[in-house]
Image (cartoon, rainbow, N blue to C red):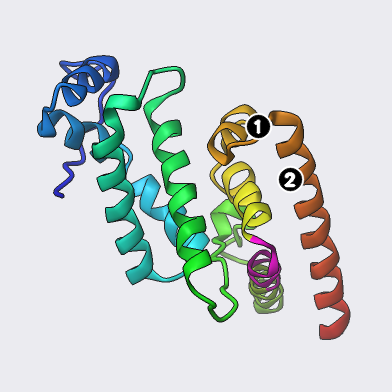
Amino acid sequence: MQLPGRRPGPGSRETEAGLVARAQAGDMDAFEQLAGAYADRLFALLLRLLDDRAEAEDVAQEVLLRAWRGIGRFQGRSQFFTWLYRIAINEVNRSLEKKSRRPISVPVDTEALQLAAAASAEPAQQAERAELRRAISKALADLPPPARTAIVLRDVEGLSTQEAAEIAGVAEAAFKSRLHQARLKVRAAIGDEALLAG
């Protein structure tokens, strides 16, 4: 399924609601335009949760196929990307359940953690930041999928609690609790990692 990078919005000739209506009427081009607006962001999410490019590509194709087949059931109560992400989370969980896999690492970039190194940063500081990124990635990878998903959606993707809870398919209160517990586990793991390194 080819996905152009056009993003529906104020500058486009057609609104997202118009594209959804056309896609629901069977217009594949409208669906590709809708999905294409979120393709890069969707793939980044899948890659963070699966940490396997080939698997993320396969799951992305499955997400888009399921979204195309299910577009008629999209009722517009949420944004299209929220609905698409919900399908993606279900597919990630399905993929993880299918396999007994080695522990994964969750890629965490400097920008996502707001740990950007200054151009003049000392090599020791840069090494400490790199070690912290590795420790955070390992801590995230050790979390169960629902907890990892909570942190990626809220803290890495930067979604609101309401959006993230909707995508995760739980009530906001349950999501907040899951996120809090996940953050505590990550902090504890990073503390342990620091003790081991010291």
Does residue 117 appear left or right of residue 8 in this picture?
Answer: right
Q: Is residue 149 above or below residue 169?
A: below
Q: Residue at x 63, y 68 (%)?
A: 141
Image quarter of residue 111: bottom right
Q: To which residue does mark 2 refer?
A: 179
Decide which of tag 2 and tag 1 comes sooner along the chain: 1
| Percent position of residue 150, x then y | 64, 47
| Percent position of residue 184, x then y | 83, 55
Q: Residue at x 19, y 26 (%)?
A: 23
Q: Amino acid at mark 2?
A: Leu
Q: Which mark is residue 129?
A: none
In the image, the segment drawn in magenta is 135-144
Location of the C terminus (image quadrant) = bottom right
At label 1, counting other C-alpha atoms closer than 10 Å, the crowd grade (few under 14, some 14-19, many 20 or more) is some
Mark 2 touches mark 1? (CB < 8 Å):
yes
| Percent position of residue 179, x then y | 73, 45
Q: Residue at x 39, y 46 (%)?
A: 41
Of 174 and 150, which appears nearest the observer? Answer: 174
Secondary structure of the residue carrying numbered label 1 = helix
Does residue 145 appear left or right of residue 177 in this picture?
Answer: left
Q: Amino acid at mark 1?
A: Thr
Secondary structure of the residue carrying numbered label 2 = helix
Does residue 5 appear left or right of residue 96 in this picture?
Answer: left
Q: To which residue does mark 1 refer?
A: 161
